[in-house]
Image: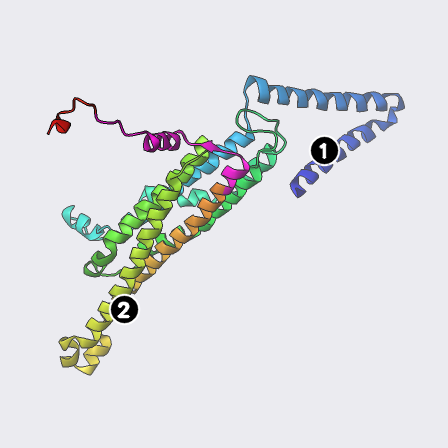
Amino acid sequence: MKAKFDYGVTVFILTYCLVSVSGYRADEVVFMAQQRLTTIAIGAFICFAVCTLVFPVWAGQELHVLVARNMDKLAAAAEGCVEDYFSDPAAVDAAAGEKPARRALSAKSQGYKQVLNAKASEDSLANLAKWEPGHGKFGFRHPYGQYQKVGAAMRCCAYCIDALAACVGSEAQTPAHIKKHLAGTCLALGRHLATVLREASGCVTSMTRSDRLGLAAADMNATAQELRDKLRCLATVLEEGEDGSPEAEQEHDAVTELRTSPLMEALPLFSAASMLLEVCARAELVIGAVETLATTARFKKADHDEKAALDTEAPVPAASAGNPVDAH
């Protein structure tokens, strides 16, 4: 709001100075003030006519599209980071005959950065949209402020994806034979997380309420619980293997101090898996913000949900009298 008042005060000072400078012509002061106000009114009318009639540019619609597009980028980034972490760049480089290089994020995995940098655009569009008349699906009191809350929830999720991306590029990596214990579950959780965010984006884009979002969230939570159980089991197995291995008893004390234990080698994997679980937990905030937006904006029920309900309620056709099965 401070920027708006500063701009208004600046325009007032410029107008006042323009009138004051010409004050030595007492007979032209009133005429110049009227001319200045008329010019401002004509300019405002032309801008309003062009933006509403000739080439409509609605800030509310731009905000709507921006939030939905950022949600798709967040879904792609979450899924891409998990895929990059469990990929084997050394094998790819060896097949290409190149020296193994440090892990790097794919272009798909870097979409979260645009979500982090979208706050200024969202705030500006939301403030402008509040002054717009009702148009299309956007009523006079459309809850544009809720879009800002959805964007804030997405940034909260993007911060954790940023930390997960740091695990991908970290120099400390867990060996592949330990990663394989959690690779399948983590990749499945990444896909379910991306599905949840894409379903939420689809609800925002189409301005509908879908039951698929709740089903996708349930699948994500079930896979997250499975990952938690596997984390506990893997930690127990590695700890028992470290304590009871015969090699550890036969090695010299000095060699034992220098040897890295399997549990220590698995710490980067535990960090990445824990960060993935935190991303899923923060995705619940995005779901809650989208559901609040759907309630306040009065989103309609999705068509595919209505068709599914009709299919489940359809009566089963009775067997005819001449059915060959009845004859037996």
Image-based side of 259 in relation to 193, left or right: left
Residue placed under numbered mark 1 in the picture:
11
Residue 307 is tagged as none
Q: Residue 308 magenta-drawn?
A: yes
Asked if disc 2 and disc 1 are in contact, CB closer than 8 Å, the reply is no
Q: Position of residue 249 (x, y in %)?
A: 16, 80
Out of 288 and 191, give the one closest to the viewer.
288
Image-based side of 319 in relation to 112, left or right: left
Residue at disc 1, secondary structure: helix
Q: Residue 6 magenta-drawn?
A: no
- Report which quarter residue 215 is drawn in: top left
- Report which quarter residue 318 is drawn in: top left
Q: Compared with residue 268, is residue 185 higher up or lower down, i.e. above or below?
A: above
The answer for how far apart the CA atoms under marks 2 and 1 are is 64 Å
Residue placed under numbered mark 2 in the picture:
264
Q: Residue at the location (23% across, 75% down)?
A: 258
Image-based side of 235 in relation to 295, left or right: left
Q: Compared with residue 227, is residue 324 higher up or lower down, i.e. above or below?
A: above
Q: Position of residue 166 (x, y in %)?
A: 36, 55
The kind of residue tagged 2 is Met
For the record, the magenta segment spans 292-319
The answer to whether one can see residue 169 in this image is no
